[in-house]
Image: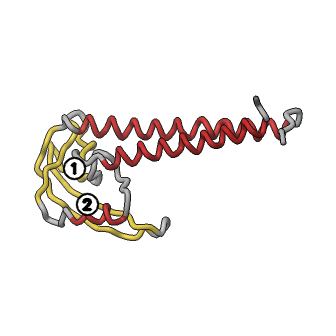
Amino acid sequence: MTLPLDDPWNRLKLMACLVVAVCIPLWMFFLFLRNVWTYWSAQGWAVAHGVILESVVFVHEARKAEHFRIRYEFTVLERIEGNTPRASGDFFYSDEAQRDFVNRYRSGQAVAVYYDPRNPKKNCIDRTDKSGVVAKGLMFLMTVVMSGGLGFGIWKLLNWK
């Protein structure tokens, strides 16, 4: 079966599929690079003493899924409240890994807070965990595979040889 390209509606559908097949992997690659950049830049950030204000796992009402919240504070010329616990992002492989991470921190616990000296609002309490970067990389590879399947489907639909 081939797709008649003389029909404008078919051409529009083909273009939409091609845009999806190219744009989604590019977007995922951008997100992956952003995570890698944050992770690597956090390795050279300054350190301040901080305190955990809140550490909980809760069910997100809109998503109906478990999520976590870790809030902490530290002082660099002014009091700063942070909520970005990992430099590698907030994506976990499983709910269990997320719970294990949250259970490492208790309210009132003293922690080292790593912050960007040029912008202290960019900060984290764990700059060594790479799992968020690895997860984003795997998500990027999955979108490449799915987009490749979409591209192959378009190729077969057009009966290109």
Which residue occupies 80% across, 35% down? 11
Q: Residue 43 carries which label?
A: none
Q: Is 49 situated left or right of 58 in this image?
A: left
Q: Which residue lies furthest to the front in this view?
A: 161
The C terminus lies in quadrant = top right
Residue 108 in which image quadrant: bottom left
Density class for disc 2 (Cα within 10 Å; few <14, some 14-19, many ≥20) is some
Secondary element under disc 2, as helix, strand or loop, is helix
Which residue occupies 47% across, 37% down? 29
Q: Which mark is residue 126?
A: 1
x, y (%) of residue 85?
A: 26, 53
- The answer to whether marks 2 and 1 mark residues whose Cβ atoms lie closer than 8 Å is yes
x, y (%) of residue 24?
A: 56, 41
Residue 145 in which image quadrant: top right
x, y (%) of residue 26?
A: 52, 35
Please, is residue 58 above or below residue 18 in the view? Answer: below
Secondary element under disc 1, as helix, strand or loop, is loop
Label 2 sits on residue: 101
